[in-house]
Amino acid sequence: MALRGKVALVTGGAQGIGRAAAEILLENQAKVALVDLNQSVGEECRNALDQKHGEGNCIFIQCDVTDRGRLQEAFQSTVEQFGRLDIVINNAGINNEKNWEKTIEVNLTSVIKGTYLALDHMSKEYGKEGGVIINVSSMAAFLHSPHQPVYTATKHGVIGFSRAMADASEQGDYGVRINALCPAFVDTQLLRTVENEETMGKFVKFKDEFKQRMDKFGVLNCFSRATLPFRQSFLTEERIDRNTSGFSPVSQR
Ligand SMILES: NC(=O)c1ccc[n+]([C@@H]2O[C@H](COP(=O)([O-])OP(=O)(O)OC[C@H]3O[C@@H](n4cnc5c(N)ncnc54)[C@H](O)[C@@H]3O)[C@@H](O)[C@H]2O)c1
């Protein structure tokens, strides 16, 4: 998919992996709506991206993705601002085993909501022009850890849901490519929560094994030029090869 002139909505876009995706989109002349809970970080991010890519290409919408009405409004505002919607990245995520119900709400329920809202605005079923949905899962979906049982469950859920929806899209001729992205370790705020009792609860005692895994696999910098071809490929390729990176192909268009 050529990105010039396309419109993307990125949840959790104010920092980390979501912000890195937004930067790639803007570099390729797409317009971006950053949808994030964190007002100050979101505004700071939008200002920095305005300076780099010019004003008017990026908007920030403060929104808790677990609030169905607010998420619906965020989609609506994006379409009102930019006139269309082509790409949705359901990326917002948390790592909180203590408040595990919230983890399910943010990491799985909101991804499902975000996918359905994306289809409302992009599916040929509703007379729209098609598009791309990327649901952010994790390597945790394949490599479980005693340190994050509920986080792991949500990321398994994202893959199962995305696979089934990709089949629905193909068989229902929605014209929407649905992929799941499964990053390994990336140096973001979320990764810093793994050592805290406040977020991991009683499972914090398994953190050493988890950190050994980080040493074994390494930790990516999502803004490094070295990861650029991979970051770009999941947004632009019609088909993504399983062997190139942690990206898991679910469907193609
Ligand atoms: N960092 C890693 O090692 C790693 C590995 C695999 C998968 N992931 C996944 O990548 C995604 C992005 O994570 P990240 O590492 O960039 O983390 P991050 O903490 O840097 O960014 C997450 C963003 O989501 C936002 N957010 C959290 N709850 C929200 C809510 N209720 N509503 C709206 N926005 C909300 C935060 O404000 C933040 O800006 C997550 O789904 C995460 O599970 C991360």
Image (tube, grey):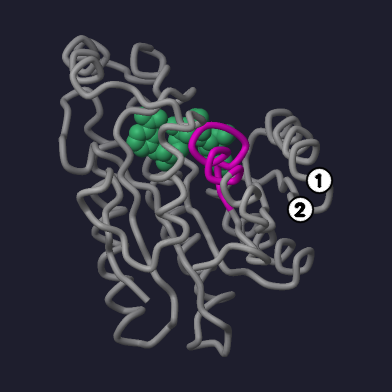
- The answer to whether residue 95 is visible is no
Coordinates of residue 88 in the picture (x, y in percent)? 53, 60
Asked whether the beta carbons under mark 1 and mark 2 sit within 8 Å of each other, the answer is yes
Beta carbon at label 1 within 8 Å of ligand 1 = no
Q: Residue furthest right?
A: 55
Instruction: Please give the residue where the numbered disc 2 appears in the rendered image.
Output: 57
Give above or below for 53 relative to 190: below
State the count of labels: 2
Coordinates of residue 86 in the picture (x, y in percent)? 58, 69
What residue is shown at x 75% (from left), y 72% (from top)? 83
Q: Which mark is residue 70?
A: none
Give above or below for 44 relative to 183: above
Q: Mark 1, residues whose alpha carbon is within 10 Å: few (<14), some, or many (≥20)?
A: few
Q: CA distance from mark 1 to mark 2?
A: 7 Å
Q: Which residues are magenta?
A: 10-23
Mark 2: which amino acid? Asn
Instruction: Please give the residue where the numbered disc 1 appears in the rendered image.
Output: 54
Q: Secondary structure at mark 1?
A: loop
Name the side, left or right, on which 177 lies relative to 128.
left
Coordinates of residue 112 in the picture (x, y in percent)? 41, 60
